[in-house]
Amino acid sequence: MNTIDKITRADIPARTSPGYSQEDFLRHVRLRGRRIRIRRILRGGTGILVILLVWQIMSQVLDLELILPQPLTVLRNVIRTLTLTEKPWLYGPNIYVHLSHSFLRAMTGFAAAAVLAIPLGLAIGRMTTLREYVMPSIKGIYPIPGIAWIPLAILWFGLGDAAVVFVVFATTFFPLFFNTEAGARMISPTVLDAGRCFGARGLVFFFRIVLPATVPYIITGLRISLGGAWRMIVAGEMLASQDGIGYLLMESRFQFRAVDLMTAMILVAVVGYATEKLIVDTIEKRTIEKWEVHSS
Amino acid sequence: MLKPNIVTVIYWIAVKTGAFDKNGLDIAENPFPSGQTAAGIEQLLRGGIDFYLGASGEVAHANSRYVEAGKPVPLALIEGGISSGSFFVLQDSLRGKTLDELRGMKLRIGLSNPSSYHLILFRAFLRERGMTTDNFAWEFLTLGGPEMLPAMVSHQLDGFMHDALTTTLAQRANAGFVFMSSNRGDMGENAKHLPGTGVCGNRDFMQKNSDTTRRFTQALRDASAAYAAAPKAQMVAIMAEWSRQDPGVIDDMYGNFDPRVGLTPHAAQIWWDILGSAMLARGEISPKLTLNDVFDLHYVQQTA
């Protein structure tokens, strides 16, 4: 959030400069904020339009309709899928069942990773001895790609949700852990000393100094991990599930229906984006903005 | 071709018996793992490979998309196995139950892919009885052929629909019994003669290289003849090598599996009547798709 959007009357002196009142200044700030928002929307919209235009041209000029359906064809298919009017529907339960199952699996794996990675990252970031014991093991496991866990997950947990959730967990844990650990380790000594000078100790020190200073890193980790969760849920469901968006993608591939493939991809993108807005942005608002902490 | 996969073993028999050499062909193998039938067809569409040995249903799926778009169909099934070799294996604990009794049970059934030939055949069988898989409380799980037996043994699956080799392995491990078999006529008398293995080609390539295509199909027929004439032990060794199995397993499977090709217009019609109708009823293929859009038997030498 741009800080200029949040300026209130209390933030500015009664008279800013000769000839300009406080009201003038606030109006100017609001107008500027609105202009920035409009500019962002226009630029973002232009970017999307350019992509759609290139997509349309490629599909039409190169006659790629069967492997790259036109944006309008895909949009129509998205609407038909969401309104449950897509005929024939070859993919088992309706789209909402697929999406909700994928969502639940992704969120379970992501939540489990967050519950473990954040406290562990904070502890290891602040405790050198623990870091020296644990970090080599974690760094050793880290390079293993998420998809490589799938066969093992199937062996350990069988075919079904648990295997997919585990794979999501294994993928989302590391970005969250490393970001949290780095954030906790890199807190400025000045901040820590200031906290101690003010008498902060134990849990108070942790909740008032360490956690707020680490939050920007945790938020970044959450954002990266959540994207990873959606990427991995698709791969996991392709191999070890009979529903979910990954399953839908695989089935549409076997039916050679590129339009259904793209529909499923767009729905993943939309749900993934909405999930990030809902979860990460909410956490961000309740932490970074509330505590007014910023990454250096 | 699918590899390792017993349904494509005719290719290896052709290599080992010199059938490709005899027909003046130098073959470069391009293997796809079991279950990845779509990948082979995609490569065929892109011109990455010239011929593909694998399942047959995907040709109809792919061509159907072109028919729907009003474009000429790009692929064709030019040859096929002479036996369908589809097996439905269940855990021993389910022995003695009828299909009606099994219908309401929450069973987990393994398939190599969502458009598995075995599933299409099962759907065709159900369709003749006025049912669909939606009438069953079963879960169909996709996993590669080699993973089906471990999944059965560890009770992650209640059954699977696959080929003779996976079935033999399950029987040898006492993991299950054959509930239905197309060879036995359980899926209808006509299903016995379905071409199980599909040999597909890109129509453009075949038109431009019709002589090569004819020699390719002839090599596979020569291999089939060699299989019929050769001692069992020799063929068991070849099949064991291709499928990476113990010769004892192949020996056990031998009577339940015929790798030979020999697609006839009659077999193509049976394929169309059984599998084509099942795919059409489910909406997988376009009503505009015809038998000739899927098959092209110009390149095989038909015998009386």
Image (cartoon, rainbow, N blue to C red):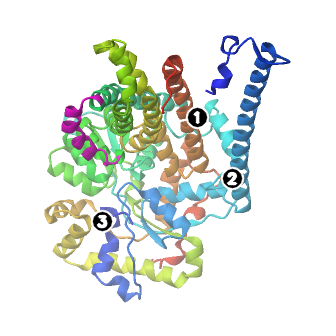
Discs 2 and 3 carry the same chain letter: no
Residue wearing tag 3: B258
Residue wearing tag 1: A270
User: SS of the residue at dot 3?
Assistant: loop
Alpha carbon separation for disc pair 3 and 1: 49 Å
* Residues shaded magenta: A126-145
Three-letter code for the amino acid on which mark 1 is drawn: Val
User: SS of the residue at dot 2?
Assistant: helix
Q: Nearer the viewer, residue B216 or A137?
A: A137
- Name the residue at 55% across, 27% down: A277
Q: Nearer the viewer, residue A13 or B254?
A: A13
Asked if residue A14 is positioned above or below residue B211 in the image, the reply reads: above
In which chain is the residue bearing label 3? B
Alpha carbon separation for disc pair 2 and 3: 48 Å
User: SS of the residue at dot 1?
Assistant: helix
In which chain is the residue bearing label 2? A
Q: Nearer the viewer, mark 3 or mark 1?
A: 1
Specify the quadrant of the image occupied by residue A162: top left
Q: Position of residue B45 (x, y in %)?
A: 55, 65
On residue A55, the disc is: 2
Assign the N terminus of chain A to one quadrant of the image.
top right
